[in-house]
Image (cartoon, helix red, strand yellow):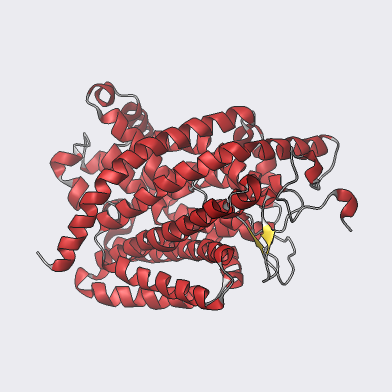
Amino acid sequence: MSFFEAINDAIASVNSVVNTYAWYLAFVFLIGLGLYFTVRTKGVQLNRLGEACRVAFTGIKEKKGKQTISSFQAFCTSMGARIGVGNIAGVAAAVVMGGPGAVFWMWIFACIGAATSFIECTVGQIFKEKKGDGYFHGGPAYYVKNGLGKPKFAIFMALLVIVTYGLMFVGVQANQASNALQTAFGSEFAIVFAVILTVLAALIVFGGIKRVARVSTWLVPTMAILWMLLALAVILVNFTQVPAVIETIFSYAFGVQQFVGGGMGMMLLWGLKRGVFSNEAGIGSIPNVSSSADVKHPVKQGLMQSVGVLIDTIVVCSATAFVIIIYTNQAYPGYNFAELGLAGTLNGVPLVAEALEATMLGAAAPYVLSVFMLVFAFSSLISYYSMSETNLKFITEKKGALVVLRIVIVAMVFFASMMSMGLAWDLADTFQAFMGIFNTAIILFLGKYAFAALKDYFDQRGEGVEEPVFDPSCLPSQNGITCWPPKDDKQ
């Protein structure tokens, strides 16, 4: 065993224990508080779905200034964070490790998490700040400082966001993109792929936040549509298998074997882990992006981001899941993955590649998939860099610190490309759990601001106002609010 492998195993061993207990606690926070927010908002994520879709998809031609991010640009950038390798490799891992029933629980958790996403993104908008660069900045660090009045804890949250997204989540994206390329072209080119990914990351990262928004506006819809078209083609070609897929998902979600055999907990946990990794509801990442939008009312971004959770999971993840289950129903009936060795040898990218090869693309599958994985990975990297930059600027405005951050992120792309798949995922999972625990606890205390803003928004809509304008006087307190003057003060 090499020195690097020994270090890899040592880290994996320690992290495994931390990961397990962190996710037990994260499950309680993410699901329990998600249900609370659903009740307090009267199911805003479903009852107001029509309005959410209206504000999400009518802003395509929305104008923005030279130093502002439009609401639609922020939505696209946030979808870039959501739509990534989690929608492909993550879904495959959920099906393998948790069984097909995990897909059903991904749907349920997305519906619950959409309410949490509404709260965190609305709160992020309320307590955002306009910095010296002319842009709006927000996220957990900002609403901890301005909403809770805890500046030291805010710095901790900023650092946690940088480590979680700028390092761990970027690492997963790079690792899975590298695995896809190795699946297609051979593992002997691993170092070459690592260098290529690193150079591409450097070109994006050193472009700055404005390029982030500009690229995401066309990249995210394009790559999502192309993946959906491919998945839909597989489903249509195998249309007669769709009823069996649905039956498989529900039978495993509620099967006696899952309850009696102890698989229920594993299925729920993997459904939550991979669902949250994909849609990022409640873990504080999306408010970093959505808070940058220049909007007339905070609830507008809250609604947009809640529908983003549903699109990511119910639509994109489901399409991938259907492709995988169509194939595994035929190739591995009974889903005895442990016996077949799938959990160790055919997981993530290789499983999706094999599914596409058997159902639609033939020998071209690994190459086509590698292109998708590359695009998905870099759309997410764009958003993760944006989050990291925002949080670094919260801590310091020194340009030297920003250069260091960019170098560290680019270096992480290289090292993660060479890292084992299991360690890359596990490290991201652990920090994802930490973010979920801290962030949901924080917005529990700040939820009253989102509840008041939600009432104000729909009171105005009920009066016939097409585009409600926010007045912070509707809130329980105006302390810490810097970007929302009362209506009488607005020109």
Indicate left or right for 41 with 321 as reference.
right
Q: Is residue 478 visible?
A: yes
Q: Residue at x 21, y 69 (%)?
A: 187
Q: Is residue 226 visible?
A: no
Indicate left or right for 327 with 488 as reference.
left
- Closest to the observer, 227 or 72: 72
Indicate left or right for 66 with 97 as reference.
right
Residue 291 position, x and y percent, is 64, 55
Residue 78 position, x and y percent, is 56, 56
- Closest to the observer, 105 or 140: 140
- Closest to the observer, 33 or 350: 33
Q: Residue at x 31, y 31 (%)?
A: 265
Q: Quadrant of residue 218?
A: bottom right
Residue 331 position, x and y percent, is 22, 43
Q: Residue at x 59, y 37 (%)?
A: 445
Above or below, comparing residue 392 to residue 243 in the picture: below
Above or below, comparing residue 434 to residue 377 in the picture: above
The quarter in which the C terminus is drawn is: bottom right
Above or below, comparing residue 415 to residue 27 in the picture: below
The quarter in which the N terminus is drawn is: bottom left
Q: Quadrant of residue 350?
A: bottom left
Residue 406 position, x and y percent, is 46, 73
Q: Residue at x 52, y 34 (%)?
A: 34
- Closest to the observer, 44 or 252: 44
